[in-house]
Amino acid sequence: MAPVAMRLAAQSLSDAQPVPFWLEDPGKPGALPALTGTEKCDLLVVGGGYSGLWTALLAKERDPSQDVVLIEGREVGWAASGRNGGFCAASLTHGFGNGLARWPGELPKLEQLGAANLDAIEDAVTRYALDCEFERTGEIDVATEAYQVEELHEWYEEAARLGLADGLTLLDQDAVRAEVNSPTFRGGLWDRDGVAMVHPAKLAWGLKRACLDLGVRIFENTPGLDLMAAGAGMAVRTPYGRVAARRVALGTNVFPSLVKRLRPYTVPVYDYALVTEPLTDEQLASIGWKNRQGLGDSANQFHYFRITADHRILWGGYDAIYRFGGKVQAEMDHRPETYLKLAEHFFTCFPQLEGLRFSHAWGGAIDTCSRFSAFFGTAHQGRVAYAQGYTGLGVGATRFGADVMLDLLDGERTERTELAMVRSKPLPFPPEPIAWAGIGITKWSLARADANGGRRNLWLKAMDKLGLGFDS
């Protein structure tokens, strides 16, 4: 980074508050009491993020008479569900390219199910009056290099061949800059219907209220410590008590699973984001963005960015930080060197916004697995179900995962449970120090590919053949 650019980037961060922008909203609900003593229920949901909230809500929709309890280690939505960029995507496979590489024969079905899932989320937003700033404006994959333009054309042609191009629009350089004006944009692929923008924390808080209205019993500041068999059901020990349940659904994602054999399948990766102060009318006019789409560039180390309801820009991604040992650690929630890098990249993308300042800077852990998209299964003779590994694209896909968990707990064969995606698992990550070294080599290789026209080296080609990867 040039000294002048570094100085300007640093100045833009001088007033940034080290807290997630979304979680500072004045509409944040108060915490519910922790669980004390012994409780019994039909279904226990562990985790108060999107995964657990959707599971509890859908369980009550399926059978309003069943007693559902949800426990959350802190407060509902405090972790990834309240810190993400607010991209609620239809994709269940972490994007078209990843789905095509892993499940080409199933991709039309997966795309159909994903679209139906996003429709169902929009319906729930209306039906339960979830005040979450839901805008189905779509997303543009932006090319900033010539080879990325070619890749976007190839994806569009493959989607058309599979009959999946409805709602997709290829944009040349002039067309993409007419949507959002950046001198770095060379082309784009606009998915007009497959992504909605949301206020992520408000979505979690709205789901919490909807669950309570349906009779779900929620206990906050109640981490699940141990999972064990208890007669014909299961029990989870908490700091001040115990919950006995016929069935258990685990929505803990990045946090260590209560089913210990699952822990090698995910690692925590830290992602970081900035939010600007509100843009003036003049600044807004300089970038356009009248259609308010989400955007993401097409590099391996990519940025995601969107505009908020009050005309701020959220700018995140690029760095994906893994710390040796793979533990979730609060001190990793902030990384000034990444904030500085992101700020410099922001002004490269939008030089006309020089002088704009950032109001918030934060990070958080997401659970990534080696195939980049969720995996599912059961334990304890089918009395426990899990879904995890969403790799940062869980705002929408967690609702689908909730349906899968409930299908599995019911012992039902459905079009969801028959999917190869649901019946298979990713390869686990190796133990340390191999995991740390392998992830480091992969990150270095991805950066080299971005700098060399997308050309993947022998390491990345070998990882591709093994179905392994590490996503930024």
Image (spheres, rainbow, N blue to C red):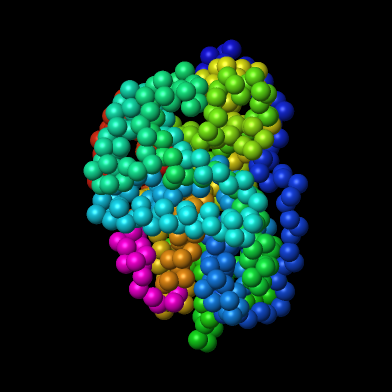
Q: Nearer the viewer, residue 63 or 445?
A: 63
**Principal secondary structure, stretch drawn in magenta:** loop
Residue at 29% over, 42% down: 159
Q: Nearer the viewer, residue 149 or 465?
A: 149
**x then y, percent, for residue 170:** 35, 31
Residue at 62% over, 68% down: 70
Q: Is residue 424 magenta?
A: yes
Q: Nearer the viewer, residue 55 or 301?
A: 55
Q: Is residue 428 magenta?
A: no
Check the image and report above or below for 339 versus 431.
above
**x then y, percent, for residue 206:** 65, 57
Residue at 23% over, 43% down: 161
- Determine if residue 273 is in view: yes
Start-end of magenta stretch: 409-426
Residue at 29% over, 28% down: 150
**x then y, percent, for residue 107:** 30, 52
Residue 152 lies left or right of residue 297; in this view the side is left
- Determine if residue 320 is in view: no
- The mark total stands at 0
Q: Nearer the viewer, residue 154 or 33?
A: 154
Q: Quadrant of the C terminus?
A: top left
**x then y, percent, for residue 210:** 64, 63
Residue 199 lies left or right of residue 391; in this view the side is right
Check the image and report above or below for 133 versus 428.
above
Check the image and report above or below for 437 versus 13.
below
Residue 355 lies left or right of residue 91; in this view the side is right
